Image (cartoon, rainbow, N blue to C red):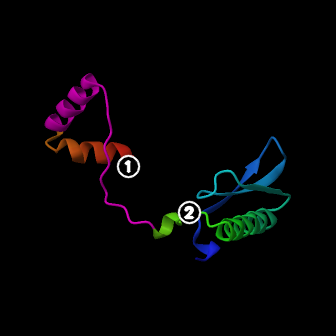
Amino acid sequence: MSIDHYTYRVTWSAEDAEHVGLCVEFPSLSWLAPSLEEALAGIRQAVAEAVADMQSSGETIPTPLAEKRYSGEFRVRIPPEVHRTLAMQAAEQGVSLNRLASAKLAG
């Protein structure tokens, strides 16, 4: 598995006054650096080391989000009064409750 398939992000940390590199699949890892490029390189190195350690100890390595398959379905529990309100909105708009909820989540 290539560490290039993981989901990386670099953002500014006002608290640290540096860029911070993050990896979604490894939420406990981060890397502070003065530049975007250094933060990205640092978090990639940290992930590579974590993966190597996990491989050597026989641990399960996280699957990159980009390689996961999603069904497009998930359950959400909501209070009955919210369910009623959404059902009424869907009926008023002439769409299914599923379509209304999908549009609200996407917006």
Taking the image as shown, residue 72 lies to the left or right of residue 53, namely left
38 lies left or right of 72? right
Question: Residue 65: image x %, image y %?
Answer: 50, 63
Residue in front for this viewpoint, 97 or 42: 42
Q: Residue furthest front?
A: 57
Question: What span is in magenta?
Answer: 68-92
Depth check, mark 1 against mark 2: the one in front is 2
Q: Is disc 2 placed on a helix, strand or loop?
A: loop
What is the x, y in percent for residue 22? 68, 56
x, y percentage for residue 41?
Answer: 77, 69
The label shown at residue 81 is none
* Residue 85 in magenta stretch: yes
Judging by the rendered image, the residue that carries numbered circle 1 is 106
What amino acid is found at the position of numbered circle 1 in the picture? Ala
Question: Does label 1 or label 2 sit earlier along the sequence?
Answer: 2
Residue drawn at point x = 74 percent, y = 63 percent: 43
**Viewer-nearest residue: 93 or 70:** 70
The quadrant of the rendering that contains the N terminus is bottom right
- Disc 1 to disc 2, how far (Cα)? 27 Å
Residue occupied by mark 2: 62
In the image, residue 63 above or below residue 105: below
**Residue 59 horizontal side relative to residue 50, left or right:** left
